[in-house]
Amino acid sequence: AVEGILRDACNASCAAGYSGNPMARCPLDGAEFVFDGCAADCVAPRPFHAYDSPGGIRNAADPTCAEGDSVSNSGFCTARCLPGFSAAPKILNCSDGNLTPATFGCVEDCHAPDHSPHMDDVACAELVVGAVLPHGGQCTPRCEAGYRPN
Protein backbone atom coordinates (compact mmCIF):
# COMPACT_ATOMS: atom_id res chain seq x y z
CA ALA A 1 0.00 0.00 0.00
CA VAL A 2 1.13 3.51 -0.77
CA GLU A 3 1.15 5.85 2.21
CA GLY A 4 -0.93 9.02 2.14
CA ILE A 5 -3.42 7.84 -0.49
CA LEU A 6 -7.05 7.81 0.47
CA ARG A 7 -8.59 4.64 -0.90
CA ASP A 8 -12.26 5.44 -0.24
CA ALA A 9 -14.13 7.91 -2.41
CA CYS A 10 -16.21 10.66 -0.91
CA ASN A 11 -19.38 11.32 -2.90
CA ALA A 12 -20.59 14.85 -2.24
CA SER A 13 -24.07 15.98 -3.23
CA CYS A 14 -25.94 19.26 -3.03
CA ALA A 15 -28.67 19.70 -0.43
CA ALA A 16 -32.29 20.14 -1.53
CA GLY A 17 -32.78 23.57 -3.09
CA TYR A 18 -29.17 23.72 -4.33
CA SER A 19 -27.47 22.47 -7.50
CA GLY A 20 -24.06 22.47 -9.13
CA ASN A 21 -20.93 20.35 -9.15
CA PRO A 22 -20.31 19.47 -5.51
CA MET A 23 -16.85 18.52 -4.37
CA ALA A 24 -15.06 17.78 -1.15
CA ARG A 25 -11.42 18.76 -0.88
CA CYS A 26 -8.80 18.92 1.80
CA PRO A 27 -6.90 22.21 1.46
CA LEU A 28 -4.07 21.37 3.92
CA ASP A 29 -2.63 18.31 5.60
CA GLY A 30 -4.54 17.67 8.79
CA ALA A 31 -7.28 20.18 7.90
CA GLU A 32 -10.97 19.41 7.67
CA PHE A 33 -12.58 18.78 4.32
CA VAL A 34 -14.13 21.80 2.60
CA PHE A 35 -17.32 21.23 0.66
CA ASP A 36 -18.19 23.59 -2.20
CA GLY A 37 -19.60 23.73 -5.73
CA CYS A 38 -23.28 24.10 -4.82
CA ALA A 39 -25.35 27.26 -5.30
CA ALA A 40 -28.94 28.08 -4.40
CA ASP A 41 -31.66 27.26 -6.93
CA CYS A 42 -34.26 29.88 -7.82
CA VAL A 43 -37.91 29.77 -6.86
CA ALA A 44 -40.30 30.48 -9.72
CA PRO A 45 -42.40 33.66 -9.36
CA ARG A 46 -45.90 33.10 -8.02
CA PRO A 47 -49.00 33.49 -10.19
CA PHE A 48 -51.73 35.84 -8.99
CA HIS A 49 -54.38 34.34 -6.70
CA ALA A 50 -56.78 36.74 -4.99
CA TYR A 51 -56.49 35.13 -1.54
CA ASP A 52 -53.11 33.43 -1.20
CA SER A 53 -50.95 35.37 -3.68
CA PRO A 54 -52.41 38.85 -4.34
CA GLY A 55 -48.94 40.14 -5.29
CA GLY A 56 -48.40 37.38 -7.87
CA ILE A 57 -48.19 37.79 -11.64
CA ARG A 58 -51.61 38.41 -13.17
CA ASN A 59 -52.59 36.10 -16.07
CA ALA A 60 -49.57 33.83 -15.46
CA ALA A 61 -49.85 30.06 -15.80
CA ASP A 62 -49.15 27.80 -12.82
CA PRO A 63 -46.31 27.01 -12.59
CA THR A 64 -45.04 30.28 -14.00
CA CYS A 65 -41.85 28.68 -15.38
CA ALA A 66 -41.96 25.90 -17.99
CA GLU A 67 -39.12 24.29 -15.99
CA GLY A 68 -41.33 23.99 -12.88
CA ASP A 69 -41.52 25.65 -9.46
CA SER A 70 -37.75 25.48 -9.00
CA VAL A 71 -35.02 26.50 -11.47
CA SER A 72 -31.49 25.10 -11.15
CA ASN A 73 -28.62 27.49 -10.55
CA SER A 74 -27.21 28.70 -13.90
CA GLY A 75 -30.47 27.58 -15.53
CA PHE A 76 -33.31 29.68 -16.82
CA CYS A 77 -37.05 30.13 -16.37
CA THR A 78 -39.13 30.13 -19.54
CA ALA A 79 -42.01 32.40 -18.50
CA ARG A 80 -45.55 31.02 -18.98
CA CYS A 81 -48.84 32.88 -19.28
CA LEU A 82 -52.45 31.82 -19.63
CA PRO A 83 -53.79 31.35 -23.18
CA GLY A 84 -54.34 34.72 -24.86
CA PHE A 85 -51.38 36.33 -23.08
CA SER A 86 -47.65 36.55 -23.82
CA ALA A 87 -44.75 36.84 -21.37
CA ALA A 88 -42.46 39.87 -21.33
CA PRO A 89 -39.63 39.12 -20.92
CA LYS A 90 -39.80 35.48 -21.98
CA ILE A 91 -36.61 34.26 -20.25
CA LEU A 92 -35.34 34.84 -16.69
CA ASN A 93 -31.85 33.63 -15.71
CA CYS A 94 -31.08 31.96 -12.37
CA SER A 95 -27.85 32.77 -10.54
CA ASP A 96 -27.23 31.79 -6.91
CA GLY A 97 -30.88 31.91 -5.91
CA ASN A 98 -31.85 35.07 -7.80
CA LEU A 99 -33.78 35.40 -11.06
CA THR A 100 -32.72 38.14 -13.48
CA PRO A 101 -34.90 39.97 -14.16
CA ALA A 102 -36.74 39.15 -10.93
CA THR A 103 -40.16 38.80 -12.56
CA PHE A 104 -42.12 39.08 -15.81
CA GLY A 105 -45.52 40.30 -16.93
CA CYS A 106 -48.27 38.71 -18.99
CA VAL A 107 -49.71 41.05 -21.61
CA GLU A 108 -52.83 40.38 -23.64
CA ASP A 109 -52.32 39.13 -27.19
CA CYS A 110 -53.85 41.03 -30.12
CA HIS A 111 -56.71 39.69 -32.20
CA ALA A 112 -56.85 39.84 -35.98
CA PRO A 113 -58.46 42.94 -37.49
CA ASP A 114 -62.17 42.76 -38.23
CA HIS A 115 -62.97 41.62 -41.73
CA SER A 116 -63.29 44.47 -44.22
CA PRO A 117 -64.13 44.50 -47.94
CA HIS A 118 -61.54 42.74 -50.12
CA MET A 119 -59.60 41.40 -47.13
CA ASP A 120 -58.43 37.79 -47.44
CA ASP A 121 -60.06 35.16 -45.21
CA VAL A 122 -56.84 35.19 -43.17
CA ALA A 123 -56.37 38.90 -42.40
CA CYS A 124 -52.69 38.77 -41.44
CA ALA A 125 -49.92 36.74 -43.05
CA GLU A 126 -48.64 35.93 -39.55
CA LEU A 127 -51.98 34.35 -38.60
CA VAL A 128 -51.76 31.45 -41.03
CA VAL A 129 -50.61 29.34 -38.05
CA GLY A 130 -52.73 30.90 -35.28
CA ALA A 131 -55.68 33.07 -34.40
CA VAL A 132 -53.94 35.72 -32.27
CA LEU A 133 -50.81 37.83 -32.55
CA PRO A 134 -48.49 37.94 -29.56
CA HIS A 135 -48.26 41.30 -27.82
CA GLY A 136 -45.89 43.48 -29.86
CA GLY A 137 -46.36 41.24 -32.91
CA GLN A 138 -46.88 42.49 -36.44
CA CYS A 139 -49.81 42.03 -38.85
CA THR A 140 -48.95 42.04 -42.54
CA PRO A 141 -52.36 42.58 -44.24
CA ARG A 142 -53.57 40.05 -46.80
CA CYS A 143 -56.04 41.02 -49.52
CA GLU A 144 -58.21 39.10 -51.95
CA ALA A 145 -56.65 38.39 -55.35
CA GLY A 146 -56.43 41.59 -57.42
CA TYR A 147 -56.29 43.92 -54.39
CA ARG A 148 -53.44 45.27 -52.28
CA PRO A 149 -53.26 47.01 -48.88
CA ASN A 150 -53.36 50.80 -48.81
Image: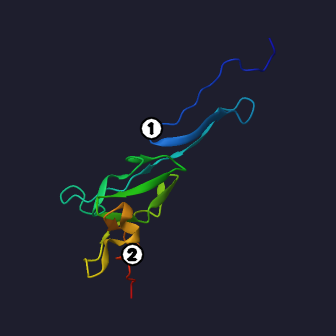
Quick one: label 1 or label 2, which is nearer the N terminus? Answer: 1
Question: Going 44% across and 65% down the picture, which residue do you hit?
Answer: 89
Residue 131 is situated, as x and y percent measured from the top left of the image, at 31, 64
- Outermost residue, left direction? 51
Q: Is residue 33 left or right of residue 111?
A: right
Q: Is residue 14 left or right of residue 86?
A: right
Question: Going 66% across and 18% down the picture, which residue do you hit?
Answer: 8
- Outermost residue, top direction? 1
Q: Nearer the viewer, residue 137 or 90?
A: 137
- Outermost residue, bottom direction? 150
Using the image, determine if residue 24 lies above or below residue 108. above
How far, Cα to Cα, is label 1 from label 2?
47 Å
Q: Quarter-wise, where is residue 4 in the image? A: top right
- Outermost residue, right direction? 2
Disc 1 element = loop
Residue 106 is situated, as x and y percent measured from the top left of the image, at 33, 65
Residue 17 is situated, as x and y percent measured from the top left of the image, at 45, 42
Q: Which residue is mark 2?
A: 139
What amino acid is found at the position of numbered circle 1 in the picture?
Ala
Where's the N terminus, which quadrant?
Answer: top right
User: Local crowd at mark 2 within 10 Å, few (<14), some, or many (≥20)?
Assistant: some
Q: Which residue is mark 1?
A: 16
Q: Nearer the viewer, residue 120 or 112?
A: 120
Question: Going 52% across and 41% down the picture, which residue do you hit?
Answer: 19
Q: Nearer the viewer, residue 133 or 128?
A: 128
